[in-house]
Amino acid sequence: MSRSVRDRLRSWVRAEPAAPLDVETWSAPAAREGDIPGAEDCSELLWARGFLLTAEAHRPPLPHWRRERLGGRWLSWDPRTPLAVARAGSAWAAVLGRAIDLDGFSGDTAAIAATLLRARAGGGREALLERLDALSGRYAVFDGDEHSAFVQTDAAGMRAVFYRDGAPEPAVASHAGLVAEHTGAGPSAFPDPELLRAAEGAYALPGRATTFADVVMLTPNTELDLVGGRVRRCFPRRARERRTAGEVVDAVLPLLQGQLAALTETERLEVSLTAGLDSRTTLALTRPFTEKLSYFTYDTVGSGGPTRRGVQHDVAVAAELAGRLGLEHHRIEVERRTPAEPLRSVMERNSPRRSHPGLSEAHRAHTPERGLHLRSNLYEIGRAYYRSKREQPRTLKPAHMVGLLTKGRSQSPELRAAFAEYVDATGFDRAQRLYDPSDLFYWEHRSGMWLNAHLSESDIAFDTFILVNSRLVYRLLLSAPLKDRIAGTVFLELIRRSWPEVLEVPVNGETLR
């Protein structure tokens, strides 16, 4: 990292000097798919890449899961997800998943855990939160000492955290169903996400709700006190900054390029490629690394998936880009929308809300030893998704949230009640005085609740990494003027500075050069 980039980053992250602690670290790298014993009933894929954290000792949910003591708590986890732990006296910090520290672009999670622990010791929770702003990736972070313990997700909640609401020292897990099975929770007021989607047009469950009573999601930008069971908001902590689009590009481009350089040193990356702007942005950023990467596009024609026309367009554009640019590209044909048993039942337990389960089944069959999926979602957080569609109120209330959830089709009292609980539990009203509430809602609910289910579904095939998934990156993207955000100015300029030739092929049918 150049000195100018490092100096700018340290001006954005108001970190306290690290405490001079004697820190011990321990880490377990991600196990390969071939290291996990298969089973005829596909049970090795249940709660794939998941975890369970409890105050009491528990039996790991699956035989191949590992177990570790974190302070006075017990963590069990699928070894396909890496874990790193740092300890100093009675204090500890742990990172479960893949993370990159944007201050130096280190992907060494043991070093990251030690950095977080030192920040916590030197400046308390505020210093820890500042350091977490500068992490990118898909992970959960735990920290504690003899008196306290906390957990929070990555910036957009892609490594999900669910817990039993209202319980002291609550059980916490990667899947709502895993919490429910551990605690004996029954069905909630929303037991079937697919029925809710058909009846109300809801893209996901409302608020923090899950299909299980009193089991809720820990939404992005909040952390859970594992001792008292209380939720505290940890972002935004200050009012939205303001920059020109050019200044945002200057700041964001090296942060994304640095992550790719770090990832290609240690991971085999598979990059999904479609006809859209987000995918085109990621493609442009990969230019220096194409010889180390493979690209793929799903062909779902005939599987009951999206419309034939849309799929054929994605496949045709991806093939044209690959031919022009000399990319190693694979078309993965998806034969059916829903896998056959026993995989179907396992996937339904992992993610009751379904996107297209057949994609993961097809990917497993296509590539036995799969790489890390570089995915191009979450860019729309920086593109004013809701305000680009239509005028939105300056203050969001539960009724407005229901309208966004259902595209105006419903004002169900049950949905409004769930969003009222979300607003109250997460301190949303305070946050929307600092940031545009439609941006926060897209970030925390549309992304955290909706997209998270897609990743849980795909976890049977591969882990996922999204370059923009950092609170620091979102702070920068959201600091651009609204008109530039709606126009996608920052992303188009990222492409022009990285690989302008990728715009020679129209983006979703539109020429953007």
Image (spheres, rainbow, N blue to C red):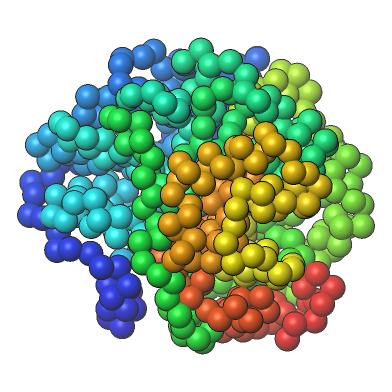
Q: In front: 167, or 305?
A: 167
The residue positioned 84% from the left and 73% from the top of the image is 509
Q: Position of residue 68 (x, y in %)?
A: 29, 26
Residue at the location (74% across, 61% down)? 274
In the rendered image, the vertical position of residue 284 relative to residue 215, given as above or below = below
- Quarter of the image that includes the N terminus: bottom left
Vertical order, 228 against 262 (above or below): above
Nearest the eye: 418 or 38: 418
| Closer to the camera in the image, 384 or 391 | 391
Pick whichever, 132 or 322, lies toward us.
132
Instruction: Look at the image and tell me in which quarter the C terminus lies.
Output: bottom right
* Residue 22 % position (x, y): 8, 46
Counting labels gives: 0
Locate residue 296, reporting x and y percent: 70, 54
For image coordinates 35% across by 31% down, the residue present is: 229
Q: Residue 168: horizontal and vertical position, in percent?
A: 33, 24
Q: Quadrant of residue 235?
A: bottom left
Task: Name the residue at 8% across, 49% down.
Answer: 21
Q: Is residue 456 visible?
A: no
Q: In terms of image quadrants, where is residue 458? A: top right
Compared with 508, 46 (above or below) is: above
Q: Decide if residue 196 is in sight here.
A: yes
